[in-house]
Amino acid sequence: YLVVAADKGTATFSDIANEVAISYGFWLGDAFASGGSVGYDHKAMGITARGAWESVKRHFREMEQDTQTQDFTVVGVGDMSGDVFGNGMLLSEHIRLLAAFDHRHIFLDPTPDAANSYVERRRLFDLPRSSWADYDARLISEGGGVWPRTAKSIPIPAQIRAALGIESDPGVQPGEDGASEAAHSMTPAELMKAILLAPADLLWNGGIGTYVKASTENHLDVGDRANDAIRVDGSAVRCKVVGEGGNLGCTQLGRIEYALAGGRINTDAIDNSAGVDTSDHEVNIKILLNRVRDDGLIDDAGRSALLAEMTDEVGALVLADNYNQNAALANEAIYSAQMLDVDQRYMRHLARQGRLNRTIEFLPSERILSERFRDGVGLTGPELSVLLAYSKIELADVLVDSRLPDDEAVHHVLYDYFPTRLRDHYREQMDDHPLRREIVTTGLVNTTVNIAGITGVFRLQEESGAALDDLVRAHVASCAIFGVQDVWAQAAALDNVVPASVQATMRLEATRLAERSTRWLLLHAAQPVDISEEVSRYREGAAAVIAMLPQQMGGNDVQAYSDRRTELESDGVPADQAARIATFPKAIAALDIVKVATEHRHTLREVGEVYHFLAEELALSAMLERIIALPRGGRWQAIARATLRDDFNALHAELTADVLQCGADGDDAKARFEDWKTRTADSQRRAVAMLGDIGSGDAQDLATLVVAVRVLRGMLAQS
């Protein structure tokens, strides 16, 4: 279908296209071109700017700054009559817009009052066909003003020099050789270049054109001759954050260079995706309502009214996508350097499949990766943004051709895509939606990759050899069993309440638990995983086990839990959430405990007590921590570590079941273990002593831990 940017001069194009589609009897009808008179007006919704603002807010949160309550400085490209720039500059009353330019004017306000300038920007936005020339000059601070781009020169008083950080000749960037006394006038091109290089908090691009390139690129590479005179290098950009509401404002190499210099940036595809996302929703909603209309449940007038009534909720659904994708990228950025080896393997995997050409996508070559390894530098935000897209595309291609989208256990993904009014009244028509499988696939892919991470599913496939759709089945079940998405929602609710790093900790603890649980289900559940069956089997029991963990864990485990909980609470996480998340590093044991309790007909409390007694008595918990601490830099190290951990956990569960067969009803864990020891051979008692030696020692190498697993396995074989 057609996505029409209904801005200046194109507002009627969607209606024209839809009339043609209807005249041809095309099945989409007036869903052929989004944004028409019976559709969602992107500018009125401000949706593209609001989506990009989710990226801006995330970047500022990571600097422990709240854009909605604290003043911050902005320079930008665009004017208040434009959709993206205009809407964007109204998204916070704390914006201090220092300077901006469009194709007509240059606006300068070196020391703006945030409140008064917000009101004036609102007036200009509401004024038809406004320009910066309409800005009330009485509200502009001393030294500022509005100048046409056709001016021969523009005065640069001290206030402007201070605001834009102009300390050298106009042709010399700050810090370069040849800096001399400050310029007192500039050509429009020199001034616009200085605006792009200003040390503001945010550079907001809402215009047309490419303004940032890499120092390794020439202007011919960029292909935007109109802006050659004002384009700057990414390494020279001094703002803290770049928000790309417009398309192609930076070259990809320019973004990467800026990010390597410490700037915070995604890509335009990440930042301004909300417009296309809104169009997707509009088209899918119209397809649904066309069927509702054909069933005689609504007429054209009612359909149009319903579409309008759902505008705000459609916007909220779209912005949730922007938010969650930014949260995923925030997680990736934290461990980018540590995960570089995995990212490299994943890029090689995509290249072997013919999916990825690193050169075309400006992803680092093997030589550059070697330099990054040497310097301890991972992939940048723009590079992670591209790889995130490839990860989702690969998974979507597989899932849409699998049986998973038809599984009743994931039907909620289809319903959750649509606004509440439609979910409440038209589920039958949703089930018959011609793009049902594609909608479910898209939702599953977004959730899975956002939570598991860019390489999460790839790593699980490396370690298990399972098919991608089977991995996603297990991951969906795992997230449902442990309420992983609830934790992500709880973290989101703490925006600007706790540090962004604490929110990331909450998300990552849930992500790790989902990964371990996915691996567990692949090992222990019937394949392919029956999502509904496994969730029914484990969710309630796992919750009960997790609730008992603080009382049943011993020694170092309970101390580590207490420390984690205290730290989360001190950072501002609500006590109940902190208590739950603090259990997550040990929560994978819940699956083994539920399994043993079910198969051997013991209570969860009995099994949990024995399980954790053995963890302390035989130093199993200490050994597991050492396994987790093993290096996993290369593929085979990662597989060895994962295999050893899985074997160790399985043997721990088997030993728990073995000990539970000893003693009498009502005996505590220690009594059962003592009875177990009296029934065992001398060789087993020696094995117990050997495990104690290994657990109490300092050795953390793979060989020692392999011996521990072998001793544990031998001990069970003889019992």
Image (cartoon, helix red, strand yellow):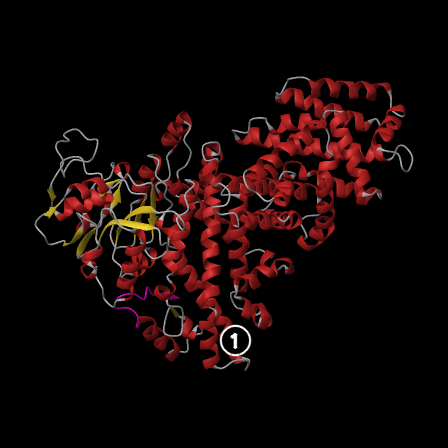
Direction from residue 719 to residue 248 in the image, left or right: left
**What's under tag 1, amino acid-wise?**
Arg
Q: How many marks?
A: 1
Q: Is residue 571 above or below residue 115?
A: above
Determine which residue is flagged by label 1.
Answer: 291
- x and y percentages locating residue 685 in the rendered image: 83, 20
Q: Which residues are magenta?
A: 1-12
Quadrant assignment, res 424: bottom right
Residue 585, located in which quarter of the rendered image? top right
Which one is nearer the viewer's eye here, 357 or 131? 131
Looking at this rendering, what residue extends furthest in the left direction?
152
Residue ID at (52%, 75%) = 291
Q: Main secondary structure of the magenta part?
A: loop
Q: Is residue 125 magenta?
A: no
The image position of residue 329, as x and y in percent, is 45, 44
Residue neighbourhood size for the residue with mark 1, other residues' Cα within 10 Å, grouped as few (<14), some (14–19), many (≥20): some
Which quadrant does the N terminus fall into?
Answer: bottom left
In the rendered image, residue 382, in percent from the top left (x then y), is placed at: 38, 43
- Location of residue 547 (image quadrant): top right
Can you see residue 400?
no
In the rendered structure, the answer to whether residue 193 lies left or right of residue 602 reads: left
Classify 234 as above or below 433.
above
Q: Is residue 381 above or below residue 107?
A: above
Residue at the image position 48 percent from the left and 55 percent from the top: 320
Q: Nearer the viewer, residue 17 or 583?
A: 583
Identity of the residue furthest to the right in this view: 664
Q: Position of residue 197 (x, y in %)?
A: 24, 41
Under circle 1, the secondary element is helix
